[in-house]
Image (cartoon, rainbow, N blue to C red):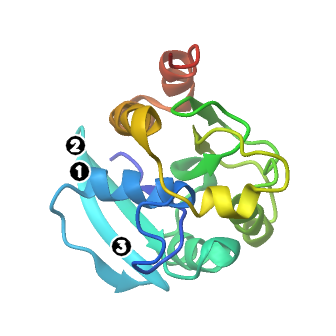
Amino acid sequence: MPSLKLVVGLGNPGPKYHGTRHNIGFDLVDRMAAGAAFTRKFEGLLAEVEIDFRRVLLLKPDTFMNLSGRSVGQAVRFHKIELADVLVVCDDLNLPVGKLRLRKGGSDGGQKGLRDVAAHFGTHEFPRLRIGIGEPEEGQAVDYVLGRFKGTDRARIDDALILASQAVAVWASQGMQAAMNRFNGPSPT
């Protein structure tokens, strides 16, 4: 029997943050839920879907970005999920808009949600999918990540979310190496 998978979308709860660059993880989880009901559990919203006959949990922590690890840790402990079966999805300021980067582990790269998840796990060695949101001007990071996509950036992100959904499906069914080989390609144009 295939192991249970957990996909965590990082973001901030509430209408004020809906659709912001920082909430790209929530956007992907919402897309993947496709009508599945979310329930309040583990200090977040949890849904269950099936991907290629595999049970996949989708989690949106309600703890705000910088405290995401608390919610993720609760879900992982309760379901006894191996870290290799947890995929954390977040925004990345260091990637061009719409570029995907899957990794088996590594540093948090300054992403505070990833940093908190790593602190709760006691390791940085867990799968992650970063979605590029582009680089802000010097000193504008906070306003930039809490802003919304516009124009061609919005179209690029919509396309990236489709690709990211496919990447998650490949990760869930074929593993991280297959997903990395297929989706860590050149930057979108």
Dot 2 crowding, Cα within 10 Å, few <14, some 14–19, many 20+ = few
**Along the line of sight, the residue nearer the viewer: 132 or 36:** 132
Going by the numbered disc 3, the residue's amino acid type is Leu
Left or right? Give the position of 8 relative to 166. Answer: right
Marks 3, 2: nearer the viewer: 3
Dot 1 crowding, Cα within 10 Å, few <14, some 14–19, many 20+ = some
Marks 1, 2: nearer the viewer: 1
Element class at badge 3: strand
Residue at image x 29%, y 68%? 47
Q: Earlier in the sequence, mark 3 or mark 2?
A: 3
171 vs 69: above or below: above
Contact (Cβ within 8 Å) of mark 1 with mark 2: yes
Q: Which residue is mark 1?
A: 50
User: Mark 1 and mark 3: span between their CA atoms?
Assistant: 14 Å
User: Mark 3 and mark 2: span between their CA atoms?
Assistant: 19 Å
Q: Is residue 167 visible?
A: no
